[in-house]
Amino acid sequence: MRASPSPLPLHPSRRKLLSPPKLSLSLGGRTFDRLIDGSRNVIVRFDKEYSYGDEHDEWKKFASQVGDSSADILVADVGVSEYGDKDNSDLADRYSIKTDDFPSYRLWLKGSAHSATPKTLDDAKKSDDFLRFVQSEAGVWIGLPGQLKALDDIAKTFTAGTKAA
């Protein structure tokens, strides 16, 4: 029997189109406490189990930007069921998140476990909002479009008003 010829290698631009998108990690009752253990920064979106729409697309865009960077942060989702077994509703209740508040975002900083009070972000709608929040609260640098880390550090020094600049 004759072996089939190996496929031609794909051009790098086409390879990226075929690779799965880098998205967030889905957390549940068994994995939540294990992954939010203080060893890393973690931002979690609490939302309906099957969310969709513009806000969801912006969150996926943010997760992809984080996945493409070398940032020390984990992006995760907790999908809360509103019907049936009401999966993960205990996690939403633990942090006083009601279904009317969805989507709701929580940030656990490195060094603080799931039992600590997380930072809250509820008014974000765009991926740039998530990036700014993570940069300001966790000190994690993920470049915004057109932003360079070296220039961003200089700008922060000047806006801080220190004489060292």
Image: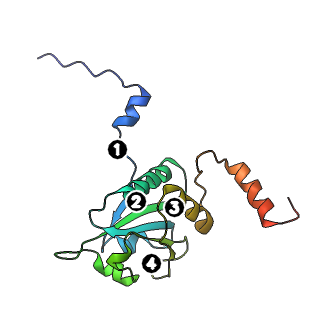
Q: Give the number of the disc on residue 55.
A: 2
Q: Amino acid at mark 4?
A: His
| N-terminal label among 2 and 3 | 2
Give how far across and how far down residue 155 sits, in percent.
75, 56
Q: Are marks 3 and 4 in contact (CB under 8 Å)?
A: no
The residue where tag 4 is placed is 114
Q: Which residue is mark 1?
A: 20
The kind of residue on which mark 2 rests is: Glu
Residue at 38% x, 30% y: name it.
14
Q: Residues within 10 Å of mark 3 (few under 14, many from 20)?
A: many
- Neighbor class of circle 4 (other Cα within 10 Å; few <14, some 14-19, many 20+) is some
Q: Label 1 amino acid?
A: Pro
Mark toward the viewer: 1 or 3: 3
**Mark 1, other Cα within 10 Å: few <14 / some 14–19 / many ≥20:** few
* Mark 2 / mark 1, whichever is N-terminal: 1
Mark 2 touches mark 4? (CB < 8 Å): no
The residue closer to the viewer here, 160 or 125, is 125
Count residues near mark 2 (Cα–Cα under 10 Å), then give few for <14, some for 14-19, many for 20+. some
Per the image, the residue denoted by label 3 is 130
Q: Earlier in the sequence, mark 3 or mark 4?
A: 4
What residue is at 43 percent from the left and 29 percent from the top?
12
For the question of whether residue 8 can be seen, the reply is yes
- Camera-side residue: 114 or 80? 80
Of the two numbered discs 1 and 3 on the same chain, state the one appearing first in sequence.
1
Q: Secondary structure at mark 4?
A: loop
Q: Give the Cα separation between the discs numbered 2 and 3.
A: 11 Å
Q: Which mark is residue 101?
A: none
Image coords of residue 139 (percent x, y): 62, 64
